[in-house]
Amino acid sequence: GFANLTKRPAKKLRDASTVLPQPYPTACTPSTRRSKHLLQSGTERRSAVDARRSSRHTIAAHPYRSYVRAAPADTTPTMQPAAGRRLRVKDLCVVLVFAGAVVTTLTSRAAAQSQLMRDEDLRVRELQERQQRADCDRKTSEAAARVEAEKDAIITQLRDEQRSLAGELKEARKAGERLSRELDGVQAQLDSVREDHDADGRAHADHKQELAERHERVLQDQAVKAESALSSCRNDLELLRRSSHATEDDLRKVKAERDAERATSVDLRKALDDALATLEEKRSVIDAASRLAELSLGAAAAPPPTKKKTKRRKDPAIAPLERIVDAKKSDVAALAKDVAVLAGGQAPPERDLAALLE
């Protein structure tokens, strides 16, 4: 591909951005201008118009020349070609052709080297295959000779075994004939034994039938007994059911009595609570009476003490209070007895009641 570049003339490539600004030819017709504009895009047309407008102030750019800025003294925005840095298409083609030749040479050398290596590998493989083939042929011939020797030995051994088997077969035939004669005698014995067995079977069947009939009669008797036992069990169940009903009635009565006893105990507990409340009230009345008596005794003016002993007289105002206290004591004792009777205990002694009242 690179060698063909030397045969073709170098073509100058053009870019839309580096098109030289040329004035429109006077000989161009509107049709040619229209076709020329149709071949260009909008960006190319605008760049061409801008290049024509700025052609008076700039230098026409060569498409394959490099440029540098002007000297600092020159402030005009012009571009000058750099000396010694011009690069043309022809030079590029020469470089590409040289590079192509180098690449082609290297490629051909690499291909030749690889071909030599492949030839060497093929040669080595052929030698190895020949050696392997020779080894295989040698081993095959040795194995064939070994197999032939073994085959001859096996054939000889098989012939000997065949002769021995033929002798054994003759002996077996003789033994078979002898066994067949013995089997005929055994068959005759078996026939006689079969006849005896048939007779025994018929006798056993008759005996079995008799046993079955007897067993059936026994089963019928047992069924009758079982029915009678079942009827007795039914009667017993009926009696048990009746007794269970009576027991249930007794349980209901017992439950009713227990409920009545519970109600009675509740009533007794309420009466006991009422008696205890009454006792507390009586106790409070007795306490009030005792406090009143103490107050009345404290209110009485005691006479001044004298040396003569005077007989102490009972205040007539205290007598009614003592009678009230005695009456309350008797009431409290009666209530205590009632409480003890309700509680199921014994009445407390009088000294305890007196201590309680004091």
Image: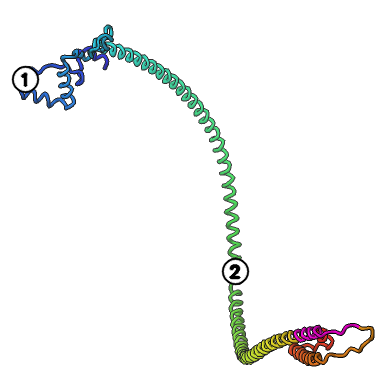
Q: Which of 59 and 230 is in front in this view?
A: 59
Name which residue lies at 91% across and 89% down.
311
Looking at the picture, how far across and down is residue 229, in whole percent? 63, 89
Magenta range is 287-305
Majority secondary structure of magenta residues:
helix
User: Quick one: which residue is furthest to the top in this view?
Assistant: 84
Name which residue lies at 49% across and 29% down.
140
Name which residue lies at 57% across and 50% down.
169
Q: Which of 11 and 166 is in front in this view?
A: 11
Disc 2 target residue:
190
**Is any part of residue 337 visible from this angle?**
no
Disc 1 target residue:
28
Mark 1 residue type: Cys
Mark 2 residue type: Leu
Disc 2 packing (10 Å; few <14; some 14–19; many ≥20): some
Q: Nearer the viewer, mark 2 or mark 1?
A: 1
